[in-house]
């Protein structure tokens, strides 16, 4: 059962859920592509063993990066309900943030050029006395912001 499902109140209903964008896999994917190029390069006998070692090390690094991205995506939950905004990150070391809708003052969306092209960005929810920070690489951030602001 998800964290959001465990903390939701009986009179509360989920209006929208936020998800991390697939772009979190970009570093691992690019590293894996570089590793494959290094491994498949036609080279002379003198440097072939060195390039193979470098190539396989890059494969290991790429797999670690891909696993980290998957784990981050799997352990991050964002939900907007009719009463509050809920965010949870982490598995063993859990970091949560909740803000009642009546305390929300503003919602800031930060998108880079690539973020605009691929529809991802960072969201900061500011409220009276506190805020929810750290919502990075969120898919469809404008849509999520609109859900928060409307309610």
Image: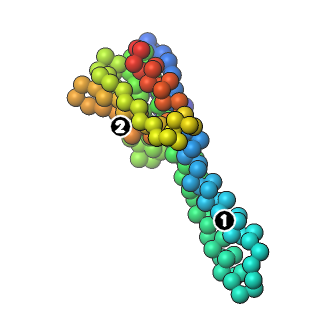
The answer to whether 12 is drawn above or below residue 116 in the figure is: above
The answer to whether 27 is drawn above or below residue 38 in the figure is: above
Q: Position of residue 99 (x, y in %)?
A: 34, 26
Return the residue nearer the eye: 47 or 92: 47
The quadrant of the picture occupied by the N terminus is: top right
* Residue 133: image tag: 2
Asked whether, in this view, residue 49 is left or right of residue 110, the answer is right
* Residue 10: image tag: none
Look at discs 2 and 1 and give the one toward the viewer. 1
Q: Position of residue 94 (x, y in %)?
A: 41, 42
The answer to whether 141 is drawn above or below residue 63 in the figure is: above
Location of residue 104 by image quarter: top left
Q: Position of residue 118 (x, y in %)?
A: 57, 37
Return the residue nearer the eye: 57 or 106: 106
Q: Mark 1 — residue?
A: 35
Q: How is the image coloured?
A: rainbow
Q: Position of residue 13 (x, y in %)?
A: 48, 16
Q: Earlier in the sequence, mark 2 or mark 1?
A: 1
Q: Which residue is painted at 42% across and 14% down in the image?
A: 150
Instruction: Answer few, some or many: residues within 10 Å of disc 1's Cα (few below 14, many 20 plus, some between 14 and 19).
Output: many
The answer to whether 64 is drawn above or below residue 89 in the figure is: below
* Mark 2, secondary structure of its residue: strand
CA gap between label 2 and label 1 equals 35 Å
Location of residue 32 by image quarter: bottom right
């Amino acid at each position: 059962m998800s964290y959001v499902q465990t903390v939701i109140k009986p009179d509360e209903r989920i209006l929208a859920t936020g998800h991390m964008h697939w772009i979190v896999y970009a570093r691992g994917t690019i590293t894996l592509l570089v590793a494959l190029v290094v491994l498949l390069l036609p080279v002379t006998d003198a440097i072939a063993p060195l390039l193979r070692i470098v190539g396989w090390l890059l494969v290991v690094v790429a797999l670690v990066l891909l696993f980290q991205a998957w784990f981050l995506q799997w352990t991050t939950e964002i939900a907007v309900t009719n009463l509050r905004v809920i965010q949870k990150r982490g598995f063993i070391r859990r970091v949560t943030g909740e803000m009642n809708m009546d305390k929300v003052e503003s919602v800031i969306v930060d998108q880079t050029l690539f973020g605009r092209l691929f529809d991802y960005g960072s969201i900061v929810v500011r409220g009276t006395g506190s805020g929810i920070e750290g919502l990075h690489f969120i898919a469809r951030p404008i849509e999520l912001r609109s859900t928060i602001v409307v309610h």
